[in-house]
């Protein structure tokens, strides 16, 4: 079994799936088997909730202030396990802040609205904006929903903002200054916080 919980630059992360509807040109998964203190983040078999629960029980969260759903896959691709794990963590550690790093395509992946339930169980929603328009977004993310993904991602993000959660939108610093500024404007219009991520650091 690959690592389900790992640490990276002082943060605690939960790797609950390797499935993802995107194959982003800049994805950190293409760099190696793992990041941080993880030895392996690629699963031979997708983890069940029992596997994830055991990893949570075996890990010392007593000093952890924030835990992030972000591994070598899109967390909402394991939607039921994501929600179950978030609820379980909140039961065990009521003061912990939970964040999900997502591509924002959960509604397309799960074929139903998901923002409300996600926001009810997870405190911070960080959405990968990636590019400021649909054509460029499809090109760089190489997603399985071409022509639909960009608008679905924006709609999901708007719904999360409407729920009152802390919502971030991120881009990687390799898309060029002009597109970074266009992306910043989109975030401002939606009401999300803009984050510029470092490609070289992998976060």
Image: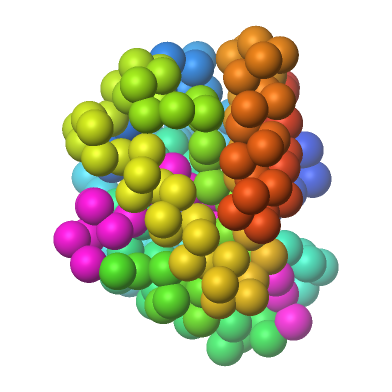
Residue segment shown in magenta:
95-112
Q: What residue is rendered at 52% in x and 28% in y?
A: 132
Q: What residue is rendered at 57% in x and 88% in y?
A: 91
Left or right of residue 96: residue 103: left
Q: Quadrant of the N terminus?
A: top left
Q: As rendered, which of 55 and 94 lies closer to the eye?
A: 94
Q: Position of residue 167 (x, y in %)?
A: 64, 59
Left or right of residue 197: residue 152: left
| 11 shown above or below 113 | above
Q: What residue is rendered at 46% in x and 33% in y?
A: 40
Q: Quadrant of the C terminus?
A: top right
Name the image quarter holding residue 201.
top right
Q: Position of residue 138 (x, y in %)?
A: 33, 24
Q: As rendered, which of 143 and 65 lies closer to the eye?
A: 143
| 11 shown above or below 129 | below
| 48 shown above or below 19 | below
| 26 shown above or below 133 | above
Q: As rendered, which of 160 and 41 lies closer to the eye?
A: 160
Q: Position of residue 153 (x, y in %)?
A: 40, 47
Magenta-drawn stretch contains 27 = no
Q: As rendered, which of 49 and 149 lies closer to the eye?
A: 149
């Amino acid at each position: 079994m690959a690592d389900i919980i790992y640490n990276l630059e002082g943060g605690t992360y939960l790797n609950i799936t390797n499935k993802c509807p995107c194959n982003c040109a800049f994805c950190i998964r293409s760099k190696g088997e793992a990041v941080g203190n993880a030895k392996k983040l690629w699963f031979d078999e997708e983890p069940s909730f029992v596997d994830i629960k055991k990893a949570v029980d075996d890990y010392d969260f007593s000093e952890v202030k924030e835990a992030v759903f972000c591994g070598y896959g899109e967390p909402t691709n394991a939607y039921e396990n994501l929600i179950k794990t978030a609820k379980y963590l909140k039961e065990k550690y009521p003061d912990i802040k939970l964040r999900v790093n997502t591509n924002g395509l959960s509604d397309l992946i799960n074929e139903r609205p998901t923002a409300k339930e996600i926001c009810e169980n997870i405190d911070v929603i960080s959405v990968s904006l990636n590019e400021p328009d649909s054509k460029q977004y499809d090109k760089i993310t190489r997603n399985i929903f071409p022509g639909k993904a960009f608008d679905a991602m924006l709609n999901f993000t708007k719904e999360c903002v409407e729920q009152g959660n802390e919502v971030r939108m991120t881009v990687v610093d390799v898309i060029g200054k002009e597109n970074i500024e266009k992306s910043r404007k989109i975030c401002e219009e939606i009401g999300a916080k803009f984050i510029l991520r470092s490609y070289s650091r992998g976060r």
